[in-house]
Structures are given as structure tokens and as C-alpha cells.
Image (spheres, coloured by chain):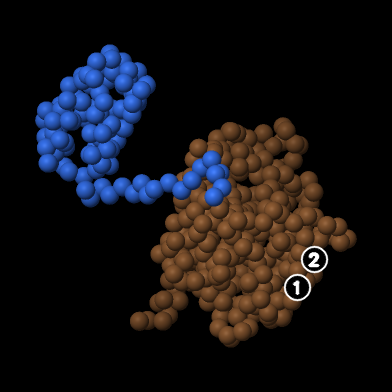
């Protein structure tokens, strides 16, 4: 094997990620699914690593959910996106980082469409001016937030107070990584490692001391798939997708699932409850499930954030077995206390899933 | 156990390697119009029997292409050959004859 040749091939699978100065846009659904993830991202990048990440309250949804549900025309979505980009330029930035994989895929699709159909770009430019009186602009670099955490993974590891290691056995935690389909399956060159070897989450896990689990259905969809889920009649297909993944990963006894998409952690988490309550099957140890966390939550854990400040109590699958393995100290009595100690109320207990 | 109103669905994996080309060619020689069916489903929409029991020519056609011929025969089992579907086919296929040909070709083991 010629090592230099392999390095050259691998370099083709990389993407340029600037080190600093980003315009940040949030995700619609992540803020309700995993409310502390984006705050943790901003705290880590701004306060722990000293980066310039700007966000404005004037940005809106990207329109992705409506677009993928066929309820909004493409030109409308493109005008919404053009407005987001215009806000970036107006605030003096040229690097655009988004929190959501659906948005990331849609931004890539839109930029590619504009490149291929300049007349459509001209029309959107006109729409933007007519509707918002904003100057059209395109980002120089379009980055997903997980790309940035990947970029900073070694800096995060340097500040880590613990590793992804089982403190009782000294063994690395077995981690399943799950990439959102819209991250690199649509535009492989836009993701670290492309569609064949997505490395964005693997890089984080390796840097933070964990061990990656390779299992047959590793690249299978999580089961979200928009219309599979939104229409109740199709929801069985969504559930079956997730079930297929869990059946495939179960023999490898993973300790944790890490994801970089809004939908994936939600479905990999919530469907474990549905599978358990409708079939009695659980996939973790002793009747527990396998915790499915966002990459910000995992970064927060290794950097020593309080698990309840990271919002881990909003997960359906209990995270306590994972916290015990990692040696994270936590107060069970504070699990369902919000800011200022307000009691949020504990959810009703599950019959099958601990 | 909790009833969520939806549940796990069995695998619907399609193995196109099982597609029997010889039998399909036999069907085509008997019924050349099989190639012009565009699976619009008009036949299924007007099916008299379909209102009461599961029967669908559109599904049967799809099953044949997906190498699920047993399902295709099952979809046509309740057909009474009334011919209503032939009256609405936008491609003018003699669907009644097609149904008989499918049954004849694929019933042979």
C-alpha cells in the first residue's frame, strides 16, 4: 500500500472549514426537541474556545419542513434562504453555519440550483429585493455546526475533564455514530468524508476517547423521512426503519448513539419507547434503552457540563446508566428542575422501558 | 402493551433477481398490451369486486414486475371478469383478457 496515495485520496474527501467568524442560524425543531444543544454549541465555541459566532433574532426558518412536505413552492423557499444569506452579509459575515441538517441539505441544494440555473438566481434576487429590500449575497463557506465541532474536536479534547471511557472497566465506550441523510448523501462533497466515509462524528468520538461501532445498517435512515412520519398512516414505516437499525446494532452492545441531525436523535430516542411499549423489546442493559445524544450534548459531557444543564432530562431514554459509566456526577433530585429551581414535573413512568 | 395506532410493518424487500423473464415473455406473447399499461389504477378504481374484497389489477401488475407473482394471483383471485375495467382503461387494454392471461401463465408451476 502506498501511504501517500491513500492520503491524497482521503484529502479529496475533506472540506474547507474556516477557523473563525461565523453567522449562526438555529434550527426550528432542535430548539424544542433538545433545547440546550444550541445554547451549548454557542457556549463552547464562544466562551470556551473564544470564537466569533454571531446570531441574530431576525433570522427565520429555512422553510425545509414545508418544502419536504410539498406545501411550499421552491421559489418561496429560495427567497427565504436568500433572505437568511442577505442577513449574513448585512452583518458583515461570509461564513454561514447552520444548526440543522435539513437546512444544510436545502442550502446546498439551493446553491447548486442557482449555480446550474442562473436565471432562477436572478429571479430570486429580484424577489428578495421586492419583498425585503435586501441585497442578494451568497456565503463563501457553507458549514454545518457539526463540521465546526469536528474542526475544534482536538481543542475540546484538550479542555475535556473526562473521556468517553467506562470508568469502571477502563474500556472505551462503544459508540454508534449516525449521520443525517441530508448531510452528505445528497451532496457528498459537502460533508467531511463524503457519503462513503462520513467522518464528522467519527472524528469527534476518536478524539474524545470512544470506540466506533461498525454494524450492518450503519448508513440506514433513522426513520424520520418527513412524509413517513407526518402522515400517521405511514408512521409504521418510520418505526420499522428505526427498528431495523436497532436490531442490527444490538449485538454490538453500544453504550451511546451520537447524531448530527435534528430528526435522528429524536426518532432514535422516542421510537425506542414506542418499540418497548408496543413489543416489550429494549436494546440497552437491564431494560434500559441506548441513549441517543446530539454531538453538542456529548461535547458538553466531556467538557464537564452538568447533564441537566445539557437538557439530558428531555430524552425519553434514561441517560443515568451512561452517566454512571462515564463517572459523571449528577443529582437525581434536580433532574426535573428547570432554571431557578422550578419543578418541571416528571413524565409518567413507562411500563417496559426503564 | 400500548396501542399507538401504528405498528412495525413486515419487511417489503424486493428481490428483482427472482423476476422470471421467460414467463413474462410468455405473457407478452399472449398479451402484447401488457407493455403499454402505465399503472394508472383506473381499473382498480372502478372494480366492482374491489369494493368488497381485495382485488386490484394495478397491484397485480406491480407484483409481477417485483417478482411477487403469488401476490399478483391473490390480487386477481376474486375477479369476476365483469369487464368494467376494460371500459375505463385510457390505453384501451383488454383488461379482462389480460387478467385471464396472467392467471394462465403464472398459475403454472
Please provide percent x and percent y for residue A49.
75, 72
Instruction: Name which quarter of the figure residue A81 lies in.
Output: top right
Where does the C terminus of chain A fall, quadrant-wise?
Answer: bottom right
Q: Residue furthest right?
A: A340
Q: Which residue is drawn at 34% across and 49% down?
A: B13
Q: On the image, numbered disc 1 is attached to which residue?
A: A330
Location of residue A275 with respect to B31 vertically, above or below = below
Q: Residue at x 80, y 55 (%)?
A: A344
Q: Nearer the viewer, residue B90 or B52?
A: B52
Instruction: Name which quarter of the figure residue B62 lies in.
Output: top left
Question: Which one of the lettered chains is coloured blue?
Answer: B
User: Left or right of A308: which side holds A242?
Assistant: left
User: Left or right of B22: which side holds B66?
Assistant: right
Q: Residue at x 21, y 45 (%)?
A: B19
Q: Residue furthest bottom?
A: A170
Q: Residue at x 59, y 72 (%)?
A: A204
Please provide percent x and percent y for residue A327.
68, 79
Q: Nearer the viewer, residue B38 or B15?
A: B15
Is there CB contact under 8 Å for labels 2 and 1? yes
Where does the N terminus of chain A fall, quadrant-wise?
Answer: bottom left
- Badge 2 and badge 1 both on one subunit: yes
Instruction: Name which quarter of the figure residue A302 lies in.
Output: bottom right
Q: What is the chain identity of the residue bearing mark 1?
A: A
- Chain A drawn colour: brown
Residue B55 seen in the figure:
yes
Residue A200 seen in the figure:
no
Q: On the image, numbered disc 2 is attached to which residue?
A: A334
Please provide percent x and percent y for residue B63.
28, 38
Callout 1: helix, strand or loop?
Answer: loop
Amino acid at each position: 500500500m502506498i501511504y501517500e496515495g491513500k492520503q491524497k485520496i482521503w484529502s479529496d474527501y475533506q472540506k474547507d472549514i474556516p477557523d473563525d467568524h461565523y453567522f449562526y442560524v438555529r434550527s426550528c425543531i432542535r430548539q424544542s426537541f433538545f433545547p440546550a444543544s444550541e445554547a451549548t454549541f454557542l457556549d463552547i465555541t464562544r466562551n470556551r474556545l473564544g470564537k466569533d459566532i454571531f446570531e441574530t433574532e431576525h433570522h427565520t426558518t429555512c422553510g425545509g419542513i414545508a418544502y419536504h412536505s410539498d406545501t411550499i413552492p421552491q421559489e418561496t423557499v429560495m427567497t427565504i434562504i436568500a433572505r437568511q444569506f442577505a442577513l449574513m452579509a448585512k452583518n458583515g459575515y461570509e461564513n454561514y453555519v447552520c444548526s440543522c441538517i435539513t437546512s444544510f441539505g436545502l442550502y446546498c441544494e439551493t446553491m447548486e440550483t442557482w449555480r446550474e440555473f442562473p436565471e432562477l438566481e436572478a429571479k430570486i434576487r429580484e424577489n428578495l429585493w421586492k419583498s425585503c429590500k435586501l441585497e442578494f449575497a451568497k456565503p463563501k463557506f457553507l458549514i454545518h455546526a457539526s463540521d465546526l465541532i469536528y474542526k475544534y474536536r482536538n481543542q475540546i479534547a484538550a479542555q475535556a475533564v473526562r473521556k468517553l471511557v467506562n470508568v469502571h472497566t477502563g474500556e472505551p465506550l462503544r459508540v454508534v455514530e449516525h449521520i443525517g441523510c441530508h448531510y452528505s448523501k445528497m451532496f457528498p462533497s459537502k460533508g467531511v468524508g463524503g457519503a462513503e466515509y462520513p467522518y464528522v462524528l467519527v472524528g469527534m468520538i476518536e478524539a474524545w476517547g470512544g470506540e466506533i461501532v461498525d454494524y450492518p445498517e450503519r448508513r440506514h435512515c433513522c426513520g424520520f423521512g418527513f412524509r413517513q412520519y407526518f402522515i400517521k398512516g405511514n408512521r409504521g414505516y418510520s418505526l420499522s426503519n428505526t427498528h431495523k437499525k436497532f436490531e442490527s446494532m444490538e449485538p454490538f452492545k453500544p453504550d451511546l448513539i451520537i447524531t448530527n441531525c435534528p430528526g435522528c436523535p429524536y426518532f432514535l430516542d422516542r421510537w425506542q419507547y414506542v418499540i418497548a411499549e408496543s413489543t416489550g423489546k429494549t436494546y440497552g442493559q437491564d431494560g434500559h434503552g441506548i441513549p441517543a445524544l446530539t454531538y453538542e450534548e456529548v461535547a458538553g459531557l466531556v467538557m464537564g457540563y452538568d447533564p441537566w444543564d445539557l437538557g439530558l432530562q428531555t430524552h425519553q431514554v434514561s441517560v443515568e446508566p451512561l452517566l454512571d459509566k462515564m463517572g459523571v456526577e449528577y443529582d437525581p433530585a434536580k433532574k426535573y428542575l428547570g432554571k431557578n429551581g422550578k419543578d418541571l414535573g416528571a413524565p409518567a413512568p413507562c411500563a417496559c422501558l426503564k | 402493551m400500548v396501542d399507538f395506532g401504528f405498528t412495525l410493518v413486515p419487511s417489503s424487500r424486493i428481490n428483482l433477481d427472482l423476476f422470471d423473464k421467460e414467463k413474462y415473455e410468455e405473457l407478452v406473447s399472449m398479451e402484447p398490451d401488457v407493455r403499454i399499461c402505465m399503472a394508472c389504477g383506473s381499473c382498480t378504481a372502478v372494480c366492482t369486486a374491489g369494493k368488497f374484497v381485495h382485488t386490484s389489477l394495478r397491484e397485480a401488475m406491480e407484483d409481477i414486475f417485483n417478482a411477487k407473482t403469488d401476490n399478483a394471483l391473490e390480487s386477481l383471485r376474486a375477479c369476476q371478469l365483469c369487464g368494467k375495467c376494460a371500459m375505463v382503461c385510457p390505453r384501451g387494454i383488454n383488461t379482462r383478457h389480460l387478467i385471464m392471461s396472467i392467471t394462465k401463465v403464472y398459475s403454472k408451476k
